[in-house]
Image: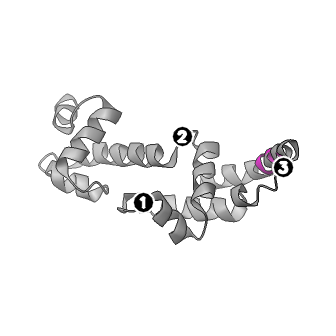
Amino acid sequence: MKKISIFLGLITRIERLILRMEQRTGGSGNNLRVNTDVIRRVEKWILENRWNEDKSMQEVARDMGISHEQLSLYFRLFWGKAFLQWRKERRIEEAKRLLLEDRHTSSLFIAESVGIGDKSNFRRQFKEVAGCTPAEWRLKH
């Protein structure tokens, strides 16, 4: 919840920045406005751990009632990365925790728990983010 209040405290500065950008470009920016409602919807989605659902970015945005452009802008502004990259990293961080929580749980079960449908895709993404395979990571830690 602390993150949400920090984000909400920054919204005025961000909206001013967007307004300045709109003035410079002459655009209205209505499709790309990240207001407090958008922030609350995305933060609620994050807090509910809905990042582990097997949905496209467009489906996630539609479920939140926002455009995929607003979702993309939110992640670029607040997390400094693309939505899909953020979600992949979040899933792998949760997978790391689960790998250590119960060392006998299969990688496939953990992959499915974090929203990655198959073991080879999980292994590839894990190695991309963590620098080693899930089995190697488990051994190191």
The single residue placed furthest to the front in the displayed view is: 26
As drawn, 5 above or below 129? below
- Magenta region: which residues? 13-17
* 15 falls in the magenta region: yes
Instruction: Give the x, y percent position of residue 70.
Output: 63, 57
Badge 1 or badge 3: first in the primary sequence: 3
Which residue matches tag 3?
Answer: 19
For this view, does 97 lie left or right of residue 27? left
3D distance between C-alphas at marks 2 and 1? 17 Å
Pick the front one: 133 or 18: 18
Q: Give how far across and how far down residue 76 sits, in percent.
A: 60, 43
Q: Tag 2: Cα neighbours inside 10 Å, few (<14), some, or many (≥20)? A: some
Q: Is residue 99 visible?
A: no
Looking at marks 2 and 1 on the same chain, the residue that comes earlier in the sequence is marked by: 1
On the rendered image, what quadrant is the N terminus found in? bottom right
Quadrant including the C terminus: top left
The alpha-carbon separation of the residues under discs 3 and 2 comes to 22 Å
Q: Position of residue 41 (x, y in %)?
A: 60, 65
Q: Amino acid at mark 2?
A: Lys
Q: Amino acid at mark 3?
A: Leu
Marks 1 & 3, CB-CB < 8 Å contact: no
> In the image, is residue 78 above or below residue 54?
above
Q: State whether residue 68 appears in this view.
A: yes
Q: Can you tell which mark lies on residue 56?
A: 1
SS at mark 2?
loop
Prevailing secondary structure class for the magenta stretch in the rendered image: helix
Which residue is identified by label 2? 81
Residue contact at pointers 2 and 1, CB within 8 angstroms: no
Q: Secondary structure at mark 3?
A: helix
Q: Which residue is found at the position 13% from the left and 51% from the top?
A: 106
